[in-house]
Amino acid sequence: MNRFESPCPGAAMATLQTRDLYLGYGRRMVVNGLDLHIPQGQVTVIVGPNGCGKSTLLAGLARLNKPRSGAVLLNGQPIGSLATRDVARLLALLPQDASAPEGITVNELIRFGRQPHQGLMRQWSAQDQLIVESALQAANLVELADRALESMSGGQRQRAWMAMAIAQDTPLLLLDEPTSALDLGHQIEVFELVRQLSHAGKTVVMVLHDLSSACRYADHLVAMKAGRIVIEGAPDTVVTSALIEELYGVSCMLVKCPRTGAPVITAVEPLPRERQRQPCRTKVVAGV
């Protein structure tokens, strides 16, 4: 992917946090009493075992899952009290299961990212077109702009959805497993683009399963288990063999990458069952 340069330098910042947040589905509670403050202008990565509440939390942050109690605060206001258009101008979400109308082209999909900025008093402008072109370039999709989305590979489609989220041009970007359909080379391209977005002032929140990638690209790591935050902080501070055992019930090898200095994790074998059933400890904020 090409280097990202924002067409709108100096765009507004936004704050996002939760306060004693409970989220669930039906009678099942998934996120339990969670307090989280997302650092501005950084990449926050949420990790944890399947079913721990990562994607549910992301949906709650994006107003797709209404809190059972507690609150999600966007710029200090309960997100549910804000107009949909106002939220969409501050926060973009790329879910795992995004779908698009049949026959839509890449360019048309990316243009949808500009909808929150349109209205009766503001129609399509040269600035909108510039932002769409910048998103196409950032995702390395310029030559595929007129291709039908359905005719593309899974990796190409994922890049198109990423470009649409970029075109929404929000200070906050939420990504649920953005590299799940990509090969190794394209994964690195997406992660590098995320890093560039952060350097351009965007606040990015990602859910990832790959711990080594999370450690390499996160400024702030949030580790979850059973709907609660176990620990959060800088990856090189919070990620230990003991944490991996606690989260995933496996022993591991943990070494520092000689090039980046980030922790690299290799799972070795499952722990005995009695060690896998340890209760979730009280949340720790590293460095505080």
Image (cartoon, grey):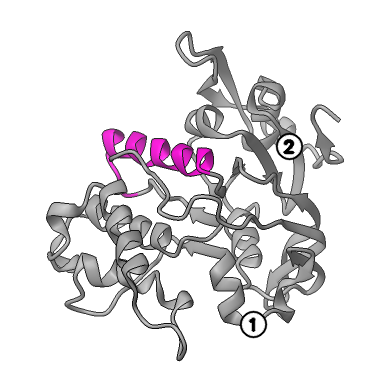
Q: Earlier in the sequence, mark 1 or mark 2?
A: 1
179 in relation to 145, above or below: above
242 in relation to 256, above or below: below
Residue occupying the point 61% across, 33% down: 219
Query: For the residues carrying marks 1 and 2, which lies nearer the camera in this image?
Result: 1
Q: Mark 2 sits on what residue? A: 232
Q: For the residues marked 1 and 2, what is the alpha-carbon distance in whole angstroms?
A: 31 Å
Residue occupying the point 21% across, 79% down: 102
Categorize mark 2 by other alpha carbons within 10 Å: few (<14), some (14-19), many (20+). many
**Is residue 83 on the magenta stretch?**
no
158 or 41: which is nearer to us?
41
Residue 53, position as x, y percentages in the image: 65, 56
Q: Residue furthest top?
A: 258
Tell me, yes or no, if residue 252 can be seen here: yes
Residue occupying the point 31% across, 60% down: 130
The kind of secondary structure element at disc 2 is strand
Amino acid tagged 1: Ala
In this picture, residue 267 sits left or right of residue 234: left
Q: Quadrant of the N terminus?
A: top left
Magenta-drawn segment: 181-200
Q: Mark 1 sits on what residue? A: 83
Amino acid tagged 2: Glu
Secondary structure mostly seen in magenta is helix
**Is residue 197 on the magenta stretch?**
yes
The kind of secondary structure element at disc 1 is loop
Task: Quadrant for residue 98, please give it.
Answer: bottom left
176 or 83: which is nearer to us?
83
250 in relation to 64, above or below: above
Residue 224, position as x, y percentages in the image: 69, 45
